[in-house]
Image (spheres, helix red, strand yellow):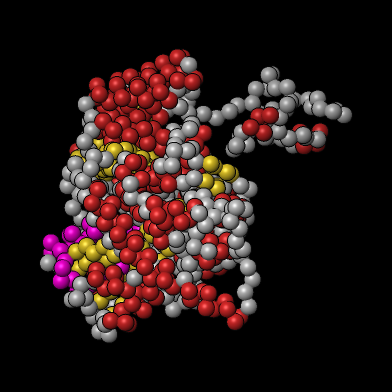
């Protein structure tokens, strides 16, 4: 092994960092969640960072994804090593040219933050529907399951395409891996450069289109020759798995991290085996560890190289003792006998074994969470006398009855500290937690992980930050439901969401609120009080909004105050060290905004530590009666009651399939937002009649239309309720 570079970053940055080294031309058109990869490459190129060939990357932003892949095609024809970064619909627009690139054996790499392709509705979240829609393009498909794998296998993709000539899709789960922050080890660029096959690179460069040695390409062929031409490239695909494995071995030799086309994990004599790829790997491995300790004979095959699918390498990973296999696909192909990976495994097993049952599982569409309880259900299903086939996980299917309910299991997380933060889109919670995780990752020997649940509303939606710290690598790729430290940054959430249920016994709960120590209990429900007492929670409050206003940051700039409060209470770092690192980060972040802004934010750190107030939790709270049940007498549509309101309460996972049958085509009733009263504003604007100049800009800039100007007739004014203020209109013609 050689000395590696330790960095705390997310999957997008890890991938882009490695890709930059091998790229001469990057042709981009940003699309969520892959955009940060292109943004990083753009910044590095603009700052003059050099690739392995001693030149900054030539970056070109096109007007569509189709243009991006077209430009990559053109540049690769002239002998340039090209990369692009995309996802979802963007990838779909590239398909026609992808067929051309594979047919012409061009060493191009697409790095894909795999994302749901829009069907009945659009989704910015992750699954494999986009990459699986490209599996007949002739591109090699290499899958990473973690931030560390993104860095290692991105290199494998670039090295293999240069030597093997087949273009590569290197993909990983959108958001779950692309935006997850981990502390990883990266190879120095010069070590990666030593692995390039220089003869293959020379051949590629010297067969590029050049007027000095012209050649004709992209011809049109008749039926008498086309078929044979397509079969002629079989040789490249037959040897590609061996090239990929060879580079995996070389990366493993340098890093000490073993990789194979198919990696096996679990009991050597496993009878029940799960096959999957992507970020679900961590949850499966944790579940297997628990089941193996109980004496279960279970295992897992992680797929790295999905195309070309190597039967030889696949069977080498499969235990001889296997009796039942469950194949987990993170995509849906309506009307098919099974999803892609399942069909491939069935085909593979038909070549070698006749006495193995192969089951199909569909899971995780649009980033649906996959906890160990879901994986446990998969293994329990294989052990049953009549196992369910073609089943789904994580939903309640009361229509076609395909779903498999979770079976709770407690996996070993000893030594891992779990922290969860409920925030408000645009309040800075996510940004502060990204800073926190990097401070801890860069300044301790702990492993770190940060993942962020975003609402499609983005600004104004609910955000949940999931942070983990520990002395050993963190594999948990699912939401935190039992936190050592829990924070709620919006007091309105306490009356809406079931937050405190997500804290461990003896955990710490921090609430940002305007209530003082003596008043806070009057604003909490009996249910919350019972949870606090029953779990022996250490309860703290802080008025970050008031602090931010007093300092001059403004009521919405509470993130620095709350970040400091977190470091004080969680005690992951010595508080003096944490303060030092936070203030250094502030000075760096706000350098361009001047000393005043830096001073205000650094003052927020001090106040976040000094202004925390501990609230006593009386033992008798655990015996409080249930809150009175308020009968719902509202005359509201079933869609609101059964779909909209549960979703607004963060209970969307509990809505059964039957409720969506009337809306399966994506059509929803209008006027639903009037039922969404979240009470999330910390201040409310007031119309000042004396100062109003009737510009109407207040209604223009307020996203919630809290002030709405109307032009009244004399008759309407007389019918207005008492206290309704008006002012004589002065507009044109009035």
The reply to whether residue 375 is in sight is no
Can you say whether 452 is above or below 260 in the image?
Answer: above
The reply to whether residue 236 is in sight is yes
Using the image as rendered, state which of residue 302 and residue 53 is in the foreground: 53
Left or right: residue 676 compared with residue 365: right
Q: Is residue 456 magenta?
A: no
Q: Position of residue 174 (x, y in %)?
A: 43, 52
Residue 538 lies in quadrant: top left
Q: Is residue 281 magenta?
A: yes
Q: Position of residue 299 (x, y in %)?
A: 22, 67
Please tell me which residue is depicted at 58% across the width and 56% down the height of the picture.
Answer: 213
Please tell me which residue is depicted at 43% across the width and 53% down the height of the picture.
Answer: 201
Using the image as rendered, state which of residue 319 and residue 243 is in the foreground: 243
Q: Position of residue 406 (x, y in %)?
A: 30, 64
Q: Which residues are magenta?
A: 267-294
Question: Which quadrant is the C terminus positioned in?
Answer: top right
Residue 544 lies in quadrant: top left
Left or right: residue 206 compared with residue 381: right
Using the image as rendered, state which of residue 554 and residue 298 is in the foreground: 298
Please tell me which residue is depicted at 61% across the width and 80% down the height of the picture.
Answer: 223
Left or right: residue 73 compared with residue 353: right
């Amino acid at each position: 092994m050689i000395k590696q570079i330790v960095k705390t970053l997310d999957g997008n940055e890890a991938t882009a960092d490695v890709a930059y080294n091998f790229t001469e031309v990057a042709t981009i058109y940003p699309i969520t969640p892959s955009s940060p990869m292109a943004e990083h490459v753009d910044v590095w190129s603009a700052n003059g960072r050099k690739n392995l060939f001693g030149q900054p990357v030539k970056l070109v932003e096109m007007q569509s994804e189709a243009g991006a892949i077209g430009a990559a095609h053109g540049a690769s024809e002239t002998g340039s090593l090209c990369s692009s970064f995309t996802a979802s619909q963007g990838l779909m627009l590239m398909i026609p040219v992808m067929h051309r690139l594979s047919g012409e054996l061009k060493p191009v790499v697409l790095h894909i933050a795999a994302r749901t392709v829009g069907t009945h509705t659009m989704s910015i979240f992750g699954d494999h529907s986009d990459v699986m829609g490209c599996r007949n393009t002739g591109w090699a498909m290499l899958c990473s399951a973690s931030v560390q794998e993104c860095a290692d296998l991105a290199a494998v993709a670039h090295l293999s395409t240069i030597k093997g000539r087949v273009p590569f899709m290197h993909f990983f789960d959108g958001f779950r891996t692309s935006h997850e922050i981990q502390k990883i080890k990266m190879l120095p660029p010069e070590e990666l450069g030593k692995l390039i096959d220089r003869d293959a690179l020379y051949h590629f460069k010297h067969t590029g289109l050049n007027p000095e040695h012209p050649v004709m390409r992209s011809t049109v062929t008749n039926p008498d020759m086309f078929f044979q031409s397509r079969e002629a490239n079989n040789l490249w695909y037959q040897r590609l798995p061996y090239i990929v494995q060879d580079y995996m071995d070389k990366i493993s030799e340098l890093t000490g991290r073993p990789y194979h086309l198919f990696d096996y994990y679990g009991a050597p004599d496993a009878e029940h085996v799960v096959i999957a790829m992507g970020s679900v790997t961590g949850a499966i491995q944790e579940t297997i560890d628990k089941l193996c300790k109980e004496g279960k004979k279970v295992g897992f095959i992680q797929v790295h190289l999905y195309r070309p699918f190597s039967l030889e390498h696949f069977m080498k990973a499969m235990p001889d003792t296997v009796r039942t296999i469950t194949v987990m696909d993170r995509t849906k192909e309506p009307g098919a006998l099974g999803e892609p990976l399942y069909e491939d495994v069935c085909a593979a097993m038909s070549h070698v074994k006749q006495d193995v049952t192969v089951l199909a599982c569909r899971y995780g569409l649009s980033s649906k969470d996959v906890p160990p309880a879901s994986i446990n259900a998969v293994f329990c299903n294989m052990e049953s006398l009549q196992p369910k086939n073609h089943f789904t996980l994580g939903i309640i299917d009361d229509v076609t009855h395909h779903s498999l309910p979770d079976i709770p299991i407690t996996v070993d997380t000893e030594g891992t500290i779990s922290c969860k933060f409920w925030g408000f889109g645009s309040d800075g919670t996510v940004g502060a937690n990204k800073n926190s995780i990097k401070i801890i990752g860069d300044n301790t020997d702990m492993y770190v992980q940060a993942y962020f649940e975003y609402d499609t509303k983005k600004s104004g939606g609910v955000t949940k930050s999931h942070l983990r710290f520990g002395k050993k690598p963190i594999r948990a790729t699912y939401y935190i439901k039992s936190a050592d430290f829990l924070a709620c940054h919006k007091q309105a959430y306490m009356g809406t969401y079931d937050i405190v249920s997500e804290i461990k016994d003896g955990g710490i709960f921090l609430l940002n609120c305007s209530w003082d120590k003596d008043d806070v209990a009057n604003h909490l429900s009996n249910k919350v009080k019972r949870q606090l007492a029953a779990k022996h929670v250490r309860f703290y409050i802080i008025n970050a909004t008031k602090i931010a206003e007093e300092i001059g940051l403004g009521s919405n700039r509470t993130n620095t105050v709350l970040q400091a409060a977190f470091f004080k209470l969680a005690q992951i770092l010595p508080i003096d060290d944490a303060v030092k690192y936070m203030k250094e980060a502030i000075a760096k972040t706000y350098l361009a905004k001047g000393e005043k802004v830096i001073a205000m934010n650094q003052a927020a750190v001090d106040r976040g530590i000094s202004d925390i107030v501990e609230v006593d939790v009386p033992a008798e709270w655990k015996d409080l009666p249930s809150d009175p049940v308020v009968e719902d007498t509202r005359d509201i549509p079933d869609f609101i009651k059964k779909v909209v309101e549960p979703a607004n309460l963060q209970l969307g996972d509990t809505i059964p399939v039957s409720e969506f049958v009337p809306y399966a085509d994506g059509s929803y009733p209008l006027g639903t937002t009037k039922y969404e009263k979240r009470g999330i504003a910390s201040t409310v604007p007031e119309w000042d009649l004396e100062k109003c100049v009737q510009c109407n800009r207040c209604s223009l800039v307020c996203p919630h239309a809290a002030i709405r100007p109307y032009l009244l007739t004399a008759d309407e004014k007389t019918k207005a309720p008492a206290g309704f203020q008006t002012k004589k209109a002065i507009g044109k013609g009035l």
